[in-house]
Image (cartoon, rainbow, N blue to C red):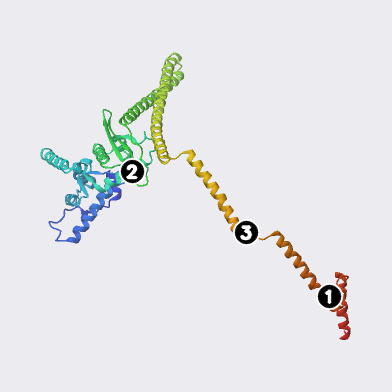
Amino acid sequence: MKEICTAVWIFHISMYGAFRASRMINPLDWDSKMDYWKKQILQYACNDKCLAPTIELAGLKEVFTQNGNVPMCLDTVFEDMIANKQCVPFTEFIDTRTALWRHPLLRMGRAISRVAQSKFRGVETTYVLTEAADKLTAMWIEHGKRQVNVTDRIMTVGALADALLPGTPSDRDRVCDLLVGLAAAVPWADVFRGDWGVAIVFTGRGIKGTTPHDPVTEGLVRGTILLRREVDSINARLADTKRREAEATEEVRAELRANRRKSALAVLRRAKMYQTAIDQLQGQAFNCNAILMKMSSASSNVGMVDAMKAGVTAMRAAMAGHSIEEAEDVAGDVSVLCEEIEAVSAVLAEGGTPDAEQDAAMDAELDAMEAAAAQETLEPAGLDPSVVQPDVLGQVEFDEVERKMMALGL
């Protein structure tokens, strides 16, 4: 952790000294130093590579000590952060975020309990940095959203701490307690306790944009945790057996190179025994993982059946008081009414609908008018329209044009 802090912290010897007795002596220097150290503490606690939601004053002094120089001003900075609720005592942070604090009497009782504990155990030295705790919560939500199967959403508090905080923090127990306290306060996580330990289940309730998951039973949680522990145990034994088998195989080769065939045969038998054990352990791990998958599938099927039952109930409620015969009667009434409407529309449109006989009469009248117009055109030329053909009409027009040209001398 000191290396991470050193990477983001610029050494300023002027910042090491303690604060003056009063801020009124030099407010600008006081505020600049206070802001500087708060920024350094937040950068240390909220670092992506090593998140530290729980801090102690002694630990901070050790982290920020450079070349034997201890920052004496951290006591005042820590007091200011506590006064502004940027740091909250660990016990108070857990108590005020559990569901019990909503009841005034229970909250008062837990407050009295904290005072009694501090009297006999001394002042609490571990604090929760609220900004780092909020970041831890956001990381937890994103981690939970990526878990699709129900068995993947069930995790022991230790496994969850390892997943959210890579590596093993020095205050791992405190981090686990912090996760349990947060899970008891938020609606999107449930806490289960049993002889197998403490487990936290991500439910997704109350998170915007996330579909809530179906609740799980304590039996499902217990079975998942025990199976995972068995798988981890099998994997550990499998890795050890593979190592022994590899060593035995190498020993066989060494014996053969030394021309000790009888010893090589004995070692080879031991290597074969390890290979058989490896096959058995792999089969056991496969069976345990298969059971985990079946458990997840069974839980999903239960949710699906419940959803289908709800859908069927809704359909029955919607169809209550209705029958097929009633629907057929309504359909028949609709058909009859449609036919009557079409008949009425046809009667109302009869006056405006064209008649075929009227069209034929009007066509004959147009032919007679065209013939009369042609007769009026041919009579001035002295031709009989009954004998003149279209080509004769063309010749008459041509002769008339030629006569006019000769009269003009053209």
Point out the residue furthest to the bottom here: 408
Residue 349 in the figure: left or right of residue 272: right
Q: Residue at x 20, y 61 (%)?
A: 28
- Label drawn at residue 141: 2
Residue 307 in the figure: left or right of residue 385: left
Mark in front: 2 vs 1:
1
CB atoms of marks 2 and 1 within 8 Å: no
Question: Which label's residue is closer to the chain start, 3 or 1?
Answer: 3
Whole-percent x, y for residue 196 in the image:
28, 28
Question: Between marks 3 and 1, how big is the CA–CA gap?
Answer: 44 Å
Question: Mark 1 falls on what kind of element?
Answer: helix
User: Is residue 248 visible to us here?
Assistant: no
Whole-percent x, y for residue 296 in the image:
39, 32
The type of residue carrying mark 1 is Leu
Q: Nearer the viewer, residue 376 or 398?
A: 376
Q: Which residue is mark 3?
A: 350
User: Is residue 294 visible to us here?
Assistant: yes
Mark in front: 3 vs 1:
3
Question: Between marks 3 and 2, how big is the CA–CA gap?
Answer: 74 Å
Q: Nearer the viewer, residue 77 or 142?
A: 142
Mark in front: 3 vs 2:
3
Q: Nearer the viewer, residue 240 or 11?
A: 240
